[in-house]
Image (spheres, helix red, strand yellow):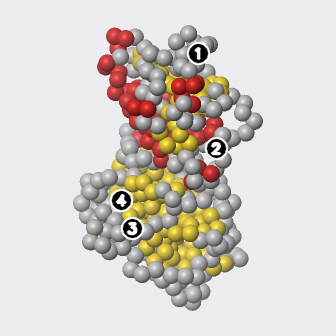
Amino acid sequence: MMKQILALVLIIGLFPLFSHAQNNNGIYIKLGEARTKKSLMAFPPLQYTGSPSTASRNQSVGIEIFNTITNDLTVSSYFQFINQSAFLEDTSKTGLMPAPGLPNGFKFQSWSSIGADFLIRAGYSVVGNEVTLETYTYHVPRAALVLGKKYKGPTSSARRIAHTFANDVMKALTGVEGPFLSRVVVSSDKGSGQSKEIFTMDWDGANMEQVSNHRSISISPAWSPDGKKIAYTSYVKRVGAKFRNADMLLLDLTTGKRSLVSYRQGINSGASFSPDGRHIYLTISQGNSPDIYKMSLDGTLVGKITNGPAGALNVEPTVSPQGLLSFSSDRAGRPMIYTADAAGNNVKRITFAGVFNSSPSWSPDGKKIAFAGQSDNNFDIFVMNADGTGMIRLTSAKKPNGRMASNEDPSFSPDGRFVMYTSNRTGKNQIYISTVDGTEERRVTNDNNNYYKPKWSNNID
């Protein structure tokens, strides 16, 4: 089933039938400025441009596309949408392009009068099981077309088409593509009682799919850089064994093949792929204090990266795009965050405060590290420069009983603008995201299940 889904994604195509971007000699929105002033965005309902006789039965497709785009651009934190009741034009009767070039086109004056910075006009049509989305994004003050693009694919790909367009809008306006085609892999007790399995989902929680079925405890998943493989640890009882062991498995999403890659007695956990995807860094205990090792994808150990000292725990390795390591270690007494080069040399301690610091995560540019830090009885998410300077706190939340909630397991979005994490503030471990400066926070999952150690993928096109 998984192989068929991935094949469908490849077949979809989602190619632009035309594409035009206005040469504006610069970026409309500079990154960082939107925190103090959001751009006002006007986004009228999508027009149905297909045969009038098919409009009613295809209305749900347009609504899904519209809602997905709206949610993506809202979450970006760069836009504030103008209420449709403030629109001065009847957008169902005006064209997608401006007058006088289009006889029934809209007037820029109608949108500048209500303070719009940007205007998206879009229409869609459905023929058979294929949907076409035609879009125009305008900069109202300059009366300029910023992005004109048409997308085409099966109706089943409506959300993917919407995510693709939202990414393109972010790229056109800020110079950096959005994260809206990315996926998340996570461990969850969803539908499985006491056990935990591995799931994948869209970044916004949609299209959740269970990809393991060990009926055991499966934890700590990680994406390969190309998004085609998932490494995770599961307490699987092997044939002939008396006890379950924390073994590491590798799942190839393209073929559906699942292989056991590290099954040394003890702990085999905490996978992080090397930037080229050819190796995995992981924690192995082998009955002694856990240390970090480098391993090829067939399970061959390439080298021991840490060695104590004096029986210290070295766990949770994570690799930057440049190949640098960050990990948690109690070698100084309390678990703190350290960095090292790919061979384990040049070890530097970069956190010194708090009781327990864990789960480091690199930003996509390798300039920042997020981690979970315990100060009292709860954990919160912090972000700092890779050398430990410039630390800021992203989270602080209370449970319904008034006690402080724990926020853990951070993971950066592929564009570096957001951090995803879990929080038990509702009584269950749910997934949230925050802007990297902590100014805005949103809940991703909204159910009665628990989620653990979500990992954000690179964009998968």
Q: Position of residue 336 (x, y in %)?
A: 55, 79
- The quarter holding residue 29 reads top right
What residue is shown at x 58% (from left), y 19% (from top)?
98
Label 3: which secondary element: loop
Mark before the other along the chain sequence, 2 or 3: 2
Question: How far is disc 4 from disc 2 in space, using C-alphas?
Answer: 32 Å
**Circle 1/circle 3 CB separation < 8 Å:** no
Mark before the other along the chain sequence, 1 or 3: 1
Neighbour tally class for label 2: few under 14, some 14-19, many 20 plus, Cα within 10 Å: some
Question: How far is disc 1 from disc 3 in space, using C-alphas?
Answer: 50 Å
Neighbour tally class for label 4: few under 14, some 14-19, many 20 plus, Cα within 10 Å: many
Q: Which residue is mark 2?
A: 29
Q: Is residue 93 left or right of residue 241?
A: right
Badge nearest the viewer, 1 or 4: 1
Numbered mark located on residue 397 in the image: 3
Mark before the other along the chain sequence, 3 or 4: 3
Task: Give the amino acid at mark 1.
Answer: Ala
